[in-house]
Image (cartoon, helix red, strand yellow):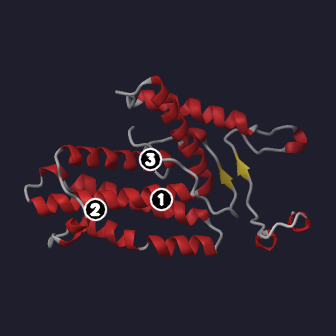
Amino acid sequence: MKLILKKLGKSYADGVYHLSYGMVDLPSGKMKSREGTVVDADDLVKEMLETAETRTKELGKIEGFNEEDLQALYKKLGLGALKYFLLKVDPKKRMLFNPEESIEFQGHTGPFIQYTYARISAILRKAKQLGIDFGPKAFSELDNIQPSEREAIILMTKFPEKIEEAARNYAPSEVAQYIFDLAKAYNHFFGAVSIFSEEKKDALAFRIAFSFAVAKIINRGMQLLGIEVPEKM
């Protein structure tokens, strides 16, 4: 491929890098092209979209959606689940891809991260409705930061470093792990602190601004993995 690109006069030919990867197995067993036991990518994507639809309906997360929005949501969840499950594993390792497990809204999955982003988006919409100013000034007016907030803030500062490491090591799994850790830390904060019950205006503004900053990093990290995050779920 590098030689062909050179002959085509492509300037990026010397930048091509072969990233070897391990075997991907399915619950039904190994894929063997010589024996015809292969999985068509289109069929797998279709299955993921159908699974996303079924699971979302089971959890009752479709209130207020029209049909067009629902189809867009199923696509984001299905493709997000598939991409994240494959990318979260070190490419050199052999892995078992389980469609049912990949679409779970809890655990180390794409939908868990997507749901965290949607949760924060709902918080930001409510904050705007209430007229809460959570601009840059909000980050300078809080003295008492909760332990769960501190945990997430420390993680947030490591985002550029993690991206550099992932690029240097050709390891998108490092980005996937980082975004999951951040989403998990934010959910820990969300469970420990009642945001809108906060009576102090500066503390309330800080927590909204903090949530906004987490959402930006989650969105950017998932974009780097080629995964969309929904505003509503």
At label 1, counting other C-alpha atoms closer than 10 Å, the crowd grade (few under 14, some 14-19, many 20 or more) is some
Residue located beneath label 2 in the image: 210
Quarter in which the N terminus is drawn: bottom right
Q: Where is residue 132 in the image (x, y as percent from the top left)?
A: 17, 53
Lower position in the chain sequence, tag 1 or tag 3:
3
Lower position in the chain sequence, tag 1 or tag 2:
2
33 lies above or below 164: above
Residue located beneath label 3 in the image: 114
Q: Where is residue 199 in the image (x, y as percent from the top left)?
A: 7, 55
At label 2, counting other C-alpha atoms closer than 10 Å, the crowd grade (few under 14, some 14-19, many 20 or more) is some
Alpha carbon separation for disc pair 1 and 3: 12 Å
Q: Where is residue 189 in the image (x, y as percent from the top left)?
A: 27, 58
Three-letter code, disc 1: Arg
36 lies above or below 225: above
Alpha carbon separation for disc pair 2 and 3: 18 Å
Outermost residue, left side: 199
Please indicate whether residue 69 sits to the left or right of residue 101 in the image.
Answer: left
Please indicate whether residue 165 sits to the left or right of residue 10 in the image.
Answer: left
Does residue 22 appear in this view?
Answer: yes
Alpha carbon separation for disc pair 1 and 2: 16 Å
51 lies above or below 6: above
Three-letter code, disc 3: Gln
Task: Answer with the quarter of the image where residue 138 lies.
Answer: bottom left
Residue located beneath label 1 in the image: 220
Q: Is the residue under label 3 in contact with that under label 2 (CB below 8 Å)?
A: no
